Amino acid sequence: MRPEWDEYFIEIAKVVSSRSTCLRRRYGAVIVKDRVIISTGYNGSPRGIQNCIDLNMCTRQERNIPSGERYELCEAVHAEQNAIINGPPERMKGATIYIAGFEEDDSFAAGRPCKLCDRMIRNSQITEVVYLDKDASLKKIDIF
């Protein structure tokens, strides 16, 4: 059966997440406009910084820091941030970002953007967020 567009692009976000270098969670993001992929991103260390997966060490994990806390201790750039950074700004106006994530055990992670990513999405003028939730359902957020 042929997938609907949202399902199609969320499947691509899942594949993009496989490039993640984070030990705790793998996220992928795909920015799409007019059904054309503009940019992709996954969570991982900035260019030139060693990846947690290569070091086999996560500071937040070692300190038992809960999800959503003490982001300043994490080296990773979020998938949404990387997709925005790598995309052409003029094409993002009116685009949709698709986000999919997985926990260490390969169960679905909540894909709703954090507050910082939400601000970056708004500032890039992306107008819709479609994300995969923990229960594998697709959720949508209209930004403007």
Image: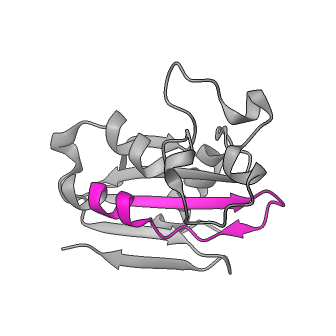
Residue 60: horizontal and vertical position, in percent? Answer: 67, 51
Q: Residue furthest top?
A: 48
Residue located at (48% from left, 42% from top): 77
Residue located at (31% from left, 68% from top): 128
Rendered view: 54 above or below 22: above
> Left or right of 54: which side holds 42?
left
Which stretch appears magenta?
Answer: 97-120
User: Depth check: 46 or 96 in front?
Assistant: 46
Rendered view: 134 above or below 17: below
Residue located at (28% from left, 61% from top): 119
Q: How is the image coloured?
A: one colour
Q: Residue 10 is drawn in which quadrant?
A: bottom right
> Left or right of 12: which side holds 25?
right
User: Depth check: 138 or 114 in front?
Assistant: 114
Image quadrant in which the C terminus is located = bottom left
Residue located at (55% from left, 64% from top): 69
**Residue 108 within the segment the image draws in magenta:** yes
Q: Residue 136 is drawn in which quadrant?
A: bottom right
